[in-house]
Amino acid sequence: MFSFERSEAEDLELIPAGVRRKLDLARQKLSLAGWTRLPREARMALVAAGDPSFEALLREVSEAAGVALDPLGPAPAEWPWRAREAPEVLRGRLDAARWAGLDDETRYSLWKLCESRRPEAREQLAQALTEI
């Protein structure tokens, strides 16, 4: 987890990147409004859940809180953050070996920052690269 993500993970008002990754893998969309309607304990449990148990827990806590999940389309043949090489914008900074050595969550976060149009994303990407 990068330093700029810590406040998200601590207050749980926003969906942390690790949970967004698990939602993508589970092919489920959870709105921010739905996320904030989940009890804090449920949000903490989703953050801590491993990939194999995440989907069942997500369905359980969502149903208990009356929060709708929207299914996403079929999974891609290859997840973009799991590609052999880093996204093109990072290739001058991370070679294939370095990219491959990063854990799945770190690669997902970097990929999302590369894809983001938010104004703060470029600054966060630069910060993330100094942290790895």
Image (cartoon, grey):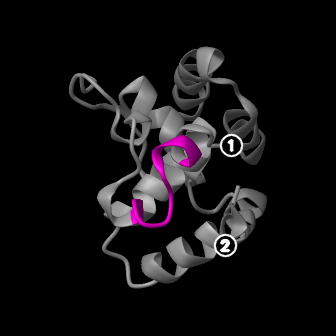
Q: Position of residue 47 (x, y in %)?
A: 69, 40
What residue type is disc 1 on? Arg
Residue 43 circle label:
1
Task: State which quadrant residue 105 falls in.
Answer: top right
Looking at the image, which is closer to me, 13 or 100? 100
Seen at 44% across and 64% down, the residue is: 113
Residue count near mark 1 (Cα–Cα under 10 Å), binned few <14, some 14–19, many ≥20:
many
Task: State which quadrant residue 44 falls in.
Answer: top right
Residue 130 circle label:
2
Q: Position of residue 122 (x, y in %)?
A: 44, 79
Seen at 61% across and 28% down, the residue is: 61
Residue count near mark 2 (Cα–Cα under 10 Å), binned few <14, some 14–19, many ≥20:
few
Magenta stretch holds residue 96: yes
Query: Answer yes or no: do the residues labelled 1 and 2 have beta carbons within 8 Å?
Result: no
Looking at the image, which is closer to me, 101 or 68? 101
Give the mark toward the camera: 1 or 2: 2
Q: Position of residue 132 (x, y in %)?
A: 68, 60
- Is residue 22 something that shows in the picture? yes
**In the drawing, does residue 59 fall left or right of residue 81?**
right
Q: Is residue 64 above or below residue 67?
A: above
What residue type is disc 2 on? Thr
Q: Secondary structure at mark 1?
A: helix
Looking at the image, which is closer to me, 50 or 82? 82
The Cα atoms of the two marked residues, 1 and 2, are separated by 29 Å
**Which residues are drawn in magenta?**
90-98
- Is residue 68 something that shows in the picture? no
**In the drawing, does residue 129 fall left or right of residue 12?**
left
Seen at 70% across and 28% down, the residue is: 49
Seen at 43% across and 34% down, the residue is: 82
Q: Position of residue 116 (x, y in %)?
A: 35, 67
Labels 1 and 2: the sequence-earlier one? 1
